[in-house]
Amino acid sequence: MKYFALTLSLLTLSMPLYAADYSVKIIDGKSISDSQAIQKFYSEHDGKFLWVADDRLTSDAKDIVDDMGKAWKHGLNPLNYHFATLSQYVKNGVPKGREVEVEILFSDAVIRYAQDLSGMRISPRELGEDTRSWSRGVDGYSLLTILAETNNREKFIQQLLPDDEIYKRLSEELTAIAEDLAKNPDKDIKKLKFPGTLKPGMSHPAILAIRQKLGVSGESDVYDDKLKKQVEDFQERNGLAADGLIGPRSFDAINQTRTQKLVKLIANLERRRWVRRPMPSRYVAVNIPQMQLQAVEDSNVAFEMPVIIGRDKRPTMSFVDEIIGVRFNPLWYVPDTIKKEDYLPALQKDPNALEKKGIQFRVKSEEGMKKVSPHDIDWSKMDEQGLKGIQMYQDSGDENSLGLIRVLMPNQYDIYLHDTNAPELFKKDDRALSSGCVRMSEPSRMANFILGKNDGWTDKKVDTYIASHKLIEIKAQSPLPVYLFYYTAWMDKKGRVIIANDLYGNDMKLVQALQQKGKIPFDLKMLP
């Protein structure tokens, strides 16, 4: 098959390499994914090679092929980077007359590899992810241009990976589990079932299996103190409340197989590579599955707090935004989803259904929005479009669903951070309870963090603004990024890797999409 329009003298490398046709689309049966970037780069650099020297690959090229072979430790598939073909060129050298082809094939592999190390491997739309928040990987032409001026090209490519301890530990955990699966494929025990919650002192046949799973000696089916201690440690290591109660979430964690852990680790390594770097030195981050918020100052965690996030049917979206200020004593305007799914059915049964919540109603009129009684509206004939024209709102105050503080972070999802009028919910272990927004357990502390850079700001101003009972909006003189992450694996304060609940099933969705495109290096046939 003829891949290039080359002269005979070019094939023997006796003429300048820029005479080659670098727009070739297929080499060795492998498609060239970014031929335009490759063509532009080599045409602007007089066809100067990066990877081939005489009839061999350069030492940098060999190091990069070696790294590609270890890409599975990051959940990446080495075969996506022409690894098998390039390995043969490392071993046997570059055949005479094929130097240009091998050079282009190698550049294509490097672009593919570098883009996967630094961004999304699946279209965000396909995953239902925000299209603007996450990195799509380095630009191919820019990458080759930088590599042409770089002494250690292999080191530069590796620097595209997240350079933090959490990423390294997750990669190590994935490596260990994958190797264990290969050596001991049948080690996982049968899944346990229990319709309820096991408490210390109870007796049940499942106790024996739990002992086996947690490595606790004994033949008793009684939930004793020795087992309770191990259960609490297990719960802590799995991101659960260490209360010793073995309920549905604890059973899910106990039943978690190595393959399920592998799926979560692949997904979490993937998402961490999506984040544009370097990270700012000051920001707010919410980890949705962990139900935890962190405020970061000078690249260190200043404080953290538990939060309430969206329930399964109304999940909190993962995206990146900017906090621009704080609103004190906010009004709450009921979102369309809540109006349609929660309030309309109740109003159709009883127009006074929302009276105790303090919900008021406005409709459009010639003079603008006019306040009306719920009895003035025919709820029985109300459709979705008509409902959008009705404004439902709640005045500020202690009963307001937003509480007394709302963080201003305008976004297309209408998701934001706010206070709550139900602080008792923070005592729950499972705090997936909202309709999508994030409720903060310490809103005043967050307000001070956001506005702390404002001239003349003092912590006492928060109390003053709240005590005024007036809606007051304060802009942040130094706006800061806010990240809403979906990480089901993280490190705890003891340095242990926590592999927790896939709250919305997003890990499985992501890994299945990668698997369907041949981007998973493991045999995951057991996935549904």
Image (cartoon, helix red, strand yellow):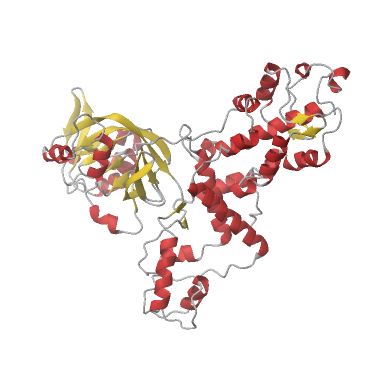
Q: Is residue 503 left or right of residue 426?
A: right
Tell me the quarter of the picture where residue 419 sits: top left
Q: Is residue 231 left or right of residue 420?
A: right
Tell me the quarter of the picture where residue 197 sits: bottom left
Q: Is residue 188 left or right of residue 83?
A: left
Q: Residue furthest right?
A: 8
Q: Residue furthest front?
A: 151
The residue nearer to you, when weighing 74 against 92, is: 92
Tell me the quarter of the picture where residue 282 sits: top left
Q: Relative to residue 132, is residue 423 depicted above or below?
A: below
Q: Residue furthest left?
A: 468
Quadrant of the image containing the N terminus: top right
Q: Relative to residue 154, is residue 7 depicted above or below?
A: above
Q: Is residue 429 shown to the viewer in this render?
A: yes
Residue 275: horizontal and vertical position, in percent? Answer: 48, 38
Residue 397: horizontal and vertical position, in percent? Answer: 15, 43
Residue 455: horizontal and vertical position, in percent? Answer: 21, 29
The residue nearer to you, when weighing 36 against 162, is: 162
Quadrant of the image containing the C terminus: bottom right
Please tell me which residue is depicted at 67% across the width and 22% down the height of the picture: 36
Q: Is residue 520 shown to the viewer in this render?
A: no
- Number of marks drawn: 0
Please tell me which residue is depicted at 28% across the width and 45% down the height of the picture: 343
Residue 169: horizontal and vertical position, in percent? Answer: 52, 52
